[in-house]
Image: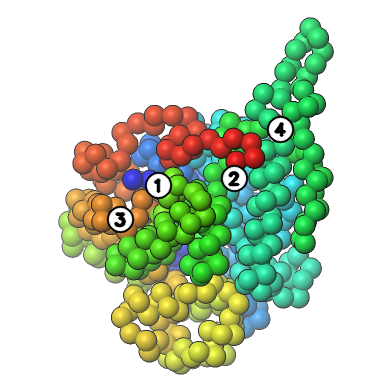
Amino acid sequence: MTLVGFMQAGNVTVYSGSWRYPSADLSFLSMEYYQRIARTLEQGKFDLVFFDDRLAMPGIYGDSVADAVRHGARPVKLDLTAVLGGIVGATSKIGVGATYSTTYYEPFHVARTFATLDHLSGGRAAWNVVTSVNDSEGQNFGREAHVGHDERYDRAHEFLEATTALWDSWEDDALIMDRDSGEFADPTKVHEVNHKGKWFRVRGPLTVPRTPQGRPAILQAGSSGRGREFAAEWADLVFTADPGLAVAQRHYSDQKERIAEAGRDPEAVKILPMAYAVVGETQAIAEEKERLFLDAYVHPVASLALLSEVMNYDFAKHDLDDPVTAEMTEASSGIRGLAEGVKRHLGRDDLTVRDLAAHRATLLQGPRFVGTAERVADQMQEWFESRGCDGFVLAATHLPGAFEEFVRMVVPILQERGLFRREYEGSTLREHLGIARPGTGH
């Protein structure tokens, strides 16, 4: 199976109360913090560590960032270029990925950033493609409101066309570097792109030669129809949020069919649900850890601040026990499908704001593997072997402890069962994933 470590370059994991966990390391403003976590995941032979990102503090709730700042609901988000550079220097095998937005960046900038990272890491770079989600991000980039859902995906499609063309603008053998003749590179093998589309105009070529992977690996998450279509065409790894195995199996089958319809090999694209594992020496210890995780450290206002951010809707106007109406979900231009996912998880249609807040704040959108190391491995094996997934994006309840416990306790069992590698067999991320290096113009 493929294993990916999910990170944020800030004070919390996906769980808004993680910084309050008694053993959580709060040195998130130091490079050693991120290097230590990456080394732990590399020790566990993970394929990749990637960082989620947003381009604004949560500021939709009450039209203010005050509650997010007060309760530590993801107000800190470091620049990922510097963080990944430090990780690359501290590791040698694990893939390194970052989130960059197709709505607020430009193709040349993103192409150069990830081509550089791929070279400096020896072929370990991955780009998590996002279209961004809310008005706060738009306002940090000079726009009053965020771009609409379908328009964002139209722009993202063209963005990928331009970016991949830039990555392909150098042929593999363009570099000559002949000191005697003085010829550095073959100009017939370095090409202008001259992309002229609705959203972007890019001349090229890229100022970075063809990379070890040919192109960095592409991650993408999106549960809407447009999101799944986009992933089918572009993604090497599809990041999902299915709450139960039956839902995951349907999503898996649907996404693989879309990949085949797009003319790609479905087996070459990895579908990975977000999950968290709470491991204990006994079942009772694991369940007590989970209880603390779910109940003890979550502040409801922090949950609502994050919910407002991800849905691009101000929940400050509602009480926690207000029902979630069709008008509320239609007014949101954020992540579509969140409410439906909560309904599937809870098994009922009558949702309240409290349900959404709890779901978003405590990672209930993915499978929850709780128990002894053997029990956690059993659950992961069931999902993997029943074609609910090709592996997992593992999120931590707290850092670095949750990853350290998983690597120490669960990874050896997965290895003993033949479900996970004992050693890296290659040096690039594509080799870890077992996916081909694309040729130019592929």
**As displayed, is residue 433 above or below residue 289?**
above
Please name which of the two marks, 2 or 3, marks the residue nearer to the observer.
3
Point 21% across, 38% down: residue: 416
**Which is more N-terminal, label 3 or label 1?**
1
**Which is more N-terminal, label 4 or label 1?**
4
SS class, disc 3: loop
> How far apart, in angstroms, are the residues tagged by discs 2 and 1?
32 Å
Residue at the spot of label 3: 387
Amino acid type, residue under disc 2 in the picture: Val
- Front residue (pair 255, 385): 255
SS class, disc 2: helix
Amino acid type, residue under disc 1 in the picture: Glu
> How far apart, in angstroms, are the residues tagged by discs 4 and 3?
38 Å
SS class, disc 4: loop
Point 21% across, 53% down: residue: 378
Residue at the spot of label 4: 170
**Which is more N-terminal, label 4 or label 2?**
2
Which quarter of the picture shows residue 58? bottom right
> How far apart, in angstroms, are the residues tagged by discs 2 and 4?
27 Å
Residue at the spot of label 1: 267
